[in-house]
């Protein structure tokens, strides 16, 4: 494949946009080469500016659980746009989307909208600190909760793949109140609370981690976090920006039966438009301004177009009783198919899937935390990424991300992907002399 127009577009972008991108992971730094500029998507397919078609497993990093340009979502956005794009005043669409979220996510009684997942997590932490009158938070190495200072300590996703998990610019004072612990180690959490019994406001966790690659909680781990937070009167925050409406209708908390005090959401609830949300127990949420003392605001929070896209998406999800079963069958078919191919080619790997999410590490498993995730052969991942791109398959341009299927993906798409992987590993192994 030739990517001439992407190369030209990237050079032009770099003249006016730092790194040529508006979000770091898009720059292909983790896999090398020139980022592919996209021009349109439809269903499971995305098309670049050179006209190449790809089966898309990035899906805008999670939002497009119904695939690109779903008719109901497109119709909702265009109808809303014709009535005006923003009013800066309350609209009934915000209430409708809030009602859908409260009905579908087990622990959410009240919810506030933001324009990104980062705003959602940032505000959830401020709320937890205001509610408990405590300063410290616990997060987990390799988990990513967006680009706010408090979270850029041992952060995952592109902070990890770019080698800046503790970004310059995050001051000591901002970092001082963030305690970073290993994921899947409940004893470490207990010890942190014993060392700081009345200082920890919240534990924020990706209940299934999508920002190290996909890393699942060990049995009992989430329940242990719940018990420890209850015991020490700290707020348990499930960051479900990625897993919400991705692994089940009600997210991880529905699958695992563990209820957090606050949940952050994003991605799917905006149907591809900028939306974040934080919600949970009314007793905590009612601490927010204007009725309570903890400040929250946002010019475009609850934006009518984003609400329309989110309502169309969640209504479609709400009305499809077998959706998550079908998605998991597809993710399982893909994961098992790729597993067989990697076994055939003697590629050391560790794979998992949950709902519509999947991930593969190129190392012996199990991968249970950042330390074990870092054993993955990122050089091999980069070769695999480009070999698959050449064969019309678009995976995440970084090892430390999860993959996604949508209701628009077919078994034929999955079969093609497995065939492409077989040819890719044949090439890679031949070139490496294996
Ligand atoms: P945004 O601010 O990017 O909307 O959401 C931040 C965020 C918060 N919490 C979790 C669990 C997340 O996965 C994210 C964002 N995810 C990344 C993908 N790993 C977004 C992709 C990007 O950074 O461009």
Image (cartoon, helix red, strand yellow):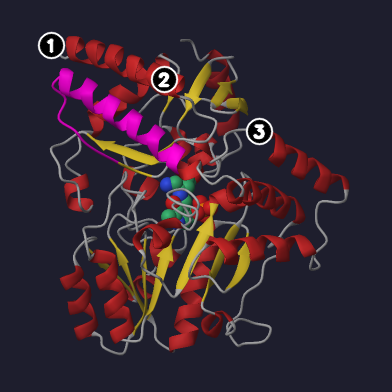
The percent position of residue 124, horizontal first and vertical second, equals 50, 72
Q: Are marks 3 and 2 in contact (CB under 8 Å)?
A: no
Q: Measuring 60% from the left and 70% from the top, which residue is drawn there?
A: 111
Tell me which label, 1 or 3, sits earlier in the chain: 3
Q: Measuring 36% from the left and 27% from the top, which residue is drawn there?
A: 32
Looking at the rendered image, the disc whose residue lies closer to the viewer, 1 or 3, is 3
Residue 421 location, quadrant: top left
Residue under label 1: 433
Q: Are marks 2 and 1 in contact (CB under 8 Å)?
A: no
At mark 1, the secondary structure is: loop
Against 372, residue 26 (above or below) is above
Asked if residue 215 lies left or right of residue 432, the reply is right
Against 417, residue 66 (above or below) is below
Q: Nearer the viewer, residue 320 or 144?
A: 320
> Within 10 Å of the Cα at label 2, are there few (<14), some (14-19), or many (20+) other Cα atoms?
many
At mark 2, the secondary structure is: helix
Q: Nearer the viewer, residue 18 or 409?
A: 409
Q: Is residue 29 visible?
A: no
Quadrant in which the C terminus is drawn = top left
Looking at the rendered structure, which numbered label has been put on residue 389?
2
Predominant secondary structure, magenta span? helix
Q: What is the CA distance from the residue labelled 1 to the residue labelled 3?
A: 43 Å
At mark 3, the secondary structure is: loop
Magenta residues (range): 325-352
Q: Measuring 47% from the left and 67% from the top, which residue is drawn there?
A: 263
Asked if residue 97 lies left or right of residue 343, the reply is right
Q: Nearer the viewer, residue 185 or 73?
A: 73
Residue 158 location, quadrant: top left
The percent position of residue 165, horizontal first and vertical second, equals 32, 54
Which residue lies most toward the right here? 83
Looking at the rendered structure, which numbered label has been put on residue 69?
3
Looking at the rendered image, the disc whose residue lies closer to the viewer, 3 or 2, is 3
């Amino acid at each position: 494949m030739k990517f001439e127009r992407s190369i030209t577009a990237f050079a032009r972008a770099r003249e006016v946009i730092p790194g040529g991108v508006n979000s770091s992971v898009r720059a292909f730094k983790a896999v090398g080469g020139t980022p592919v500029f996209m021009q349109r998507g439809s269903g499971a397919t995305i098309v670049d500016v050179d006209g190449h078609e790809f089966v898309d497993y990035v899906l805008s990093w999670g939002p497009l659980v119904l695939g690109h340009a779903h008719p109901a979502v497109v119709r909702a956005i265009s109808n809303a746009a014709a009535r005006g794009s923003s009013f800066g005043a309350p609209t009934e669409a915000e209430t409708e989307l809030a009602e859908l979220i409260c009905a579908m996510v087990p622990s959410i009684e009240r919810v506030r909208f933001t324009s990104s997942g980062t705003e959602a997590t940032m505000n959830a932490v401020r709320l937890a600190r205001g509610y408990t009158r405590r300063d410290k938070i616990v997060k987990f190495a390799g988990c990513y909760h967006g680009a706010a200072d408090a979270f850029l300590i041992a952060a995952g996703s592109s902070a990890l793949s770019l080698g800046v998990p503790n970004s310059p610019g995050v001051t000591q004072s901002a970092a001082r109140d963030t305690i970073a612990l290993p994921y899947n180690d409940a004893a470490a959490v207990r010890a942190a609370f014993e060392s700081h019994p009345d200082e920890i406001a919240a534990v924020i966790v990706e209940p299934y981690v999508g920002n190290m690659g996909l890393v699942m909680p060990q049995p009992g781990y989430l329940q242990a976090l719940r018990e420890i937070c209850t015991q020490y009167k700290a707020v348990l925050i499930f960051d479900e920006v990625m897993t919400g409406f991705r692994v089940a209708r009600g997210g991880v908390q529905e699958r695992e039966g563990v209820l957090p005090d606050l949940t952050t959401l994003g991605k799917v609830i905006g149907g591809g438009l900028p939306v974040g949300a934080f919600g949970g127990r009314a007793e905590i949420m009612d601490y927010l301004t204007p009725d309570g003392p903890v400040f929250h605001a946002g010019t475009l929070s609850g934006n009518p177009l984003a609400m329309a896209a989110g309502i169309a998406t969640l209504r479609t999800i709400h009305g499809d009783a077998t959706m998550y079963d079908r998605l998991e069958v597809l993710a399982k078919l893909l994961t098992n198919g790729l597993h067989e191919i990697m076994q055939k080619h003697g590629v050391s790997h560790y794979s998992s899937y949950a709902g519509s999410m999947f991930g593969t590490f190129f190392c012996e498993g199990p991968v249970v935390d950042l330390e074990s995730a870092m054993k993955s052969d990122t050089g091999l991942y980069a070769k695999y990424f480009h070999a698959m791109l050449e064969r019309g398959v678009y995976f995440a341009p970084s090892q430390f991300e999860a993959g996604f299927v949508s209701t628009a993906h077919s078994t034929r798409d999955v079969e093609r992907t497995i065939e492409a992987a077989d040819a890719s590993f044949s090439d890679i192994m031949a070139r490496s002399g294996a």
